[in-house]
């Protein structure tokens, strides 16, 4: 990534105006992914003065500011109290502490990367995104359609609910990309998401329907995942290998949330 | 653009490119302990402390470092000597390229981990790659420094 100048707007209106008026401008997160590209921008927009680094709990929700680091999320006790280790587990193997101190949740979400573990995990929560221009958008809608390309993500809002949720993945070594990621929750109903297939995470429809109608059908529902999703090849694993792994991770996760 | 950088408690007034990484600026200012490895965020040899937190300087924009305290291994003084002694006494270092970042991260880890265990140490240091040593010797020294049996 190259850019000519960096600006630090003092309010969201100014930041959005710069983003909209200049098609070659870019919002900076921690720049961990942005820096890998050769793309040239005119203006880099740093949101550091807009107070986006927070995790707060109110009566119904947990709100996470877009500039909250992955490391803060990993260690946060409020998140842990409500969602166990779902989110910590989804970020704790992303490179190392030095990386996660700088990478931000806003970048991890807005980047919509196929191997994004945090997206796999957030999909099973009742979760919305708040943008400056587009307002509130359900998380699953943002992930599955690419309508929002230029806006400012301000925060992630997660509804507090009683229930269980957990995250599982397979990777060959600690700081490598995952080969497959799975998250399962059991709040009002059971939700299953499968990511790094290697394409972006998606919620299951059919397997979820089956397990919600009959909690004993763990093996059948897990096997249905292979029919419901497509699994592809990349340098880490073949689609065939992912097809073998997915039902195993899903059935283990279902067993745990239903126990 | 002109910036004021606080490096090891010394203020530098210097000119940088708007998109320049902190790594490049630190090396230009003479802090050669900060190494360039992968330049993609994967190896950890460029680590510095920003406000006490280990951070990859290849990914951190120098323009954003203003107003923060940057610490390189040169700024650790006696604390660095203690960690280096623990590692060297195990005969662990080979080329030494990963050394400064490992020392800085270990220093931050000691402050952050209240109840260190071998698993927690390994997890904390997962982002520090060493190309030659195989990690075991370094780990023995660091375990001792952390007071873990
Ligand atoms: C070497 C490497 C290994 C990785 N391994 C893994 C892994 O194992 N698992 C995993 O899940 N992920 C992995 N990642 C991805 C990593 O999680 C992302 O790079 C990181 O979370 C992006 O965060 P960032 O703050 O640096 O975003 P940036 O790189 O700064 O931004 C990413 C995108 O989001 C946009 N953006 C950022 N903030 C906002 C905002 N508030 N509003 C609107 N747009 C915004 C940017 O314009 C850009 O398009 C890896 C990345 C790297 C570089
Ligand atoms: S040079 Fe920064 S992580 Fe490798
Ligand atoms: S001793 Fe050579 S890279 Fe670690």
Image (cartoon, coloured by chain):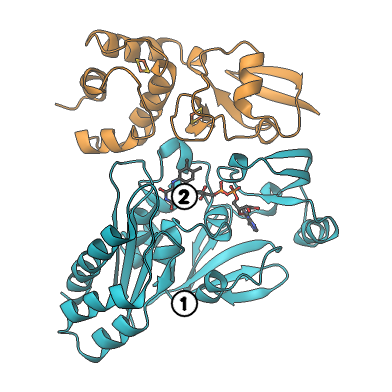
Q: CA distance from mark 2 to mark 1?
A: 23 Å
Whether residue A156 is visible here, answered yes or no, is yes
Q: Residue at x 29, y 41 (%)?
A: A173
Numbered disc 2: what chain?
A
Q: Chain A hue? A: cyan
Residue that carries the numbered disc 1 in the rendered image: A60
Residue that carries the numbered disc 2 in the rendered image: A70
Q: Residue at x 58, y 25 (%)?
A: B70
Q: In the visual, does B27 lie left or right of B98?
A: right
Considering the image in quadrants, where does the C terminus of chain A appear? bottom left
Considering the image in quadrants, where does the N terminus of chain A appear? top right
Q: Position of residue B95 (x, y in %)?
A: 37, 10
Q: Residues within 10 Å of mark 2 (few under 14, many from 20)?
A: many
Give the farthest residue toward the right: A21
Q: Which mark sits nearer the N-terminus, 2 or 1?
A: 1
**In the picture shown, does residue A33 fall above or below A188?**
above
Give the quadrant of ligand 3: top left
Q: Position of residue B43 (x, y in %)?
A: 43, 30
Whether residue A168 is visible here, answered yes or no, is no
Q: Residues within 10 Å of mark 1 (few under 14, many from 20)?
A: few
Q: Position of residue A18 (x, y in %)?
A: 82, 55
**Pointers 2 and 1 in contact (CB under 8 A)?**
no
Ligand 1 within 8 Å, label 1 CB: no
Say which mark, if any, is on residue B3.
none
Residue in the foreground of this view, choosing between A87 and A50: A87
Q: Residue at x 26, y 38 (%)?
A: B120
Specify the chain shown as orange: B
Q: In the visual, does A249 lie left or right of A162?
A: left
């Amino acid at each position: 990534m190259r850019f000519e100048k960096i600006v630090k707007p003092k309010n969201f209106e100014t930041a959005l105006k710069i983003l909209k008026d200049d098609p070659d401008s870019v919002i900076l997160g921690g720049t961990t992914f942005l820096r890998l590209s050769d793309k040239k921008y005119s203006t880099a927009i740093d949101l550091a003065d807009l107070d986006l680094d927070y995790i707060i709990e109110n009566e119904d929700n947990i709100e996470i500011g877009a500039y909250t680091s992955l490391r803060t999320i990993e260690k946060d006790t409020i998140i842990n109290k409500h969602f166990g280790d779902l989110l910590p587990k989804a970020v704790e193997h992303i490179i190392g502490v030095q990386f996660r101190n700088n990478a931000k949740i806003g970048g991890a979400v807005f980047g919509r990367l196929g191997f994004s573990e945090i997206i796999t995990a957030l999909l099973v929560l009742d979760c919305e995104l708040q943008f400056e221009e587009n307002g509130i958008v359900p998380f699953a809608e943002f992930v599955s359609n690419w309508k929002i390309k230029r806006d400012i993500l301000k925060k992630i809002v997660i509804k507090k609910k009683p229930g269980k949720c957990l995250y599982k993945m397979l990777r060959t070594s600690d700081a490598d990309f995952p080969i497959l990621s799975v998250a399962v929750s059991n709040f009002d109903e059971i939700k299953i998401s499968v990511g790094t297939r290697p394409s972006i995470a998606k919620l299951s429809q059919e397997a979820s329907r089956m397990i919600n109608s009959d909690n004993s059908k763990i093996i059948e529902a897990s096997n249905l995942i292979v029919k419901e999703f497509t699994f592809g090849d990349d340098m880490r694993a073949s689609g065939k290998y992912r097809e073998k792994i997915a039902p195993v991770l899903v059935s283990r996760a279902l067993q745990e949330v239903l126990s | 653009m002109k910036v004021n950088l606080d490096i090891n408690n010394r203020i530098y007034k210097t000119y940088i490119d708007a998109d320049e990484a902190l790594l490049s600026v630190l090396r230009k200012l003479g802090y050669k302990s900060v190494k360039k490895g992968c330049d993609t965020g994967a190896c950890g040899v460029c680590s510095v402390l920003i406000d006490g937190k280990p951070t990859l300087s290849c990914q951190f924009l120098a323009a954003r470092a203003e107003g923060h305290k940057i610490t390189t291994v040169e700024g650790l003084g006696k604390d660095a000597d203690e960690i280096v002694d623990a590692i060297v006494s195990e005969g662990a270092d080979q080329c030494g390229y990963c050394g400064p970042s490992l020392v800085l991260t270990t220093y931050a880890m000691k402050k952050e981990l209240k109840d260190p265990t071998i698993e927690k140490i390994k997890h904390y240091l997962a982002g520090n790659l060493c190309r030659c040593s195989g990690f075991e010797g370094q780990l023995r020294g660091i375990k001792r420094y952390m007071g873990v049996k």
